[in-house]
Image: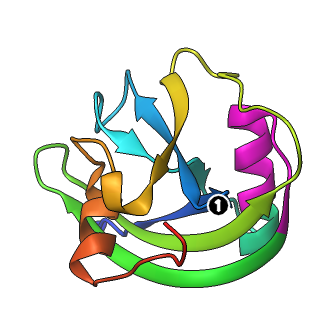
Amino acid sequence: MNEKKRPYIGVAVIVVRDGRVLLGKRKNAHGAGTWQFPGGHLEYGESIDACARRELFEETGLSIVNLRLGPFTNDVFEQEKKHYVTLFVIADPTPGDARVNEPDKCERWDWFRWSEMPAPLFLPIVNLLRQNFTITGG
């Protein structure tokens, strides 16, 4: 049987607080050692907003308000033979600090100005920056 591989759908949450965005340092997965927005896989039947809220809470303990749909990227991880379409959601957090709730997947969370993003960045962010996407106040 010649089953064709299809892309996965990822949802990344650009959480903006005081002109900074929340990034986590990935570990134990493709992109280990790179910085990425909180997020994950869109589940069957799940809305993009619901996925963004669920993934952010699972990973950081934070909740969000003022969700806005952002751009998307087409991300082919050649070495891992994985293909994702990443949907970005921009949101404001409710009060509180980000916690590492999945220590097997994330080393730490930190806030960065858009103009001072750390390196290396996860492929979806690299592709997002290639589109000249930016946030205001960052």
Percent of width and height locating residue 13: 61, 60
Percent of width and height locating residue 125: 34, 61
The quadrant of the picture occupied by the N terminus is bottom left
Question: Residue at point 36% right, 69% down?
Answer: 6
**Foreground pick, 50 / 16:** 16
Query: Is residue 88 visible in this depiction of the protein?
Result: yes
59 falls in the magenta region: yes
Mark 1: which secondary structure?
A: strand
Query: Is residue 83 visible in this depiction of the protein?
Result: no
Question: Residue at point 42% right, 78% down?
Answer: 134
- Residue 99, placed above or below residue 34: above
115 falls in the magenta region: no
Percent of width and height locating residue 49: 78, 71
Q: Quadrant of residue 74?
A: bottom left
- Residue 109, placed above or below residue 8: above
Is 12 on the left or on the right of 79, as rendered? right
Q: Amino acid at mark 1?
A: Val
